[in-house]
Amino acid sequence: MKRQSSFPMVRPLALALGLVLGLAACSATYTNHGYVPPPEILAEIGVGATQEQVAELAGAPGSAGVMRDEAWFYTQYRVRNFTYNAPQVIERDIVAISFNEAGRVSNIERFGLEDGQIIQLSRRVTESSVRDIGFLRQILSNFGRINLGDALAN
């Protein structure tokens, strides 16, 4: 009696599984970051609410105004990661709640991705005064600069 091998069936199955995994690896992944209060909660806050009321309804902000608590910022964004490409922000929502001197809400603004501005960073590099010589050579070159009279006077 001849035994049949299952090897011919394994090869097409492995090939199909490899193809499915390869295609799945090339699909985009999305990550969500941050929190923005829903419109219903923002409608409850309204102009004139105190910071305590805002914190109770909407929660603590992710960031506040620089140096002072004149504004609270809630940010939420969605990032698309695709194979070897750099991550790309595809959705952004920012809610800025401004407060007056008395600590009450004076303005609520909402900004989206289309409201942002692209800022070009400068790639200038400051040259170093350190020459391209080895550590031991730098140490040995300083021995001639030592004044023994100054060192022994202390």
Image (tube, helix red, strand yellow):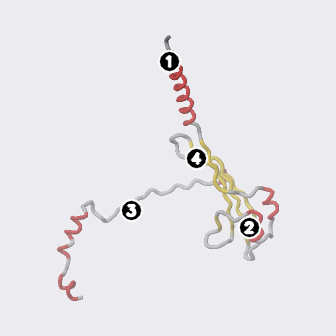
Of mark 4 and mark 2, the one earlier in the sequence is 2
Element marked by disc 2: helix
Which kind of residue does numbered mark 4 sit on? Gln
Label 1 element class? loop
- Which residue is tagged 1? 5
The CA distance from mark 3 to mark 4 is 30 Å
- Above or below residue 89? Residue 25 is above
- Residue pointed to by mark 2: 55
Neighbor class of circle 4 (other Cα within 10 Å; few <14, some 14-19, many 20+) is few
Query: Which label's residue is closer to the chain start, 3 or 1?
Result: 1
Left or right side of 101 for 5: left
Residue mark closest to the camera, 4 vs 2: 2
Report the side of 147 relative to 119 (left or right).
Answer: left
- For the image, the number of numbered tags is 4
| Circles 3, 2 touching at the beta carbon (< 8 Å) | no
Residue 123 image-quadrant placement: bottom left
Q: CA distance from mark 1 to mark 4?
A: 50 Å
In the structure shown, which secondary structural element does the residue marked by tag 3 occupy?
loop
Q: Name the N-terminal-most of marks 3 and 4.
A: 4
Along the polypeptide, which appears first: circle 3 or circle 2? 2
Q: Is residue 37 above or below residue 15?
A: below
Q: Residue at x 20, y 69 (%)?
A: 141
Graded by Cα atoms within 10 Å as few (under 14), some (14 to 19) or many (20 or more), the crowding at tag 2 reads few
Image marks 1 and 4: residues in contact by CB distance under 8 Å: no
Q: How far from the left and from the top, in percent, is residue 111?
A: 69, 56
Which residue is disc 4 drawn over?
Answer: 88
Q: CA distance from mark 1 to mark 2?
A: 69 Å
User: Which residue bears the numbered disc 3?
Assistant: 126
The amino acid beneath tag 2 is Ala
User: Of the residues shown, which amino acid type is indicated by label 3?
Assistant: Thr
Nearer the observer, disc 3 or disc 2? 2
Which quarter of the picture shows residue 93? Answer: bottom right
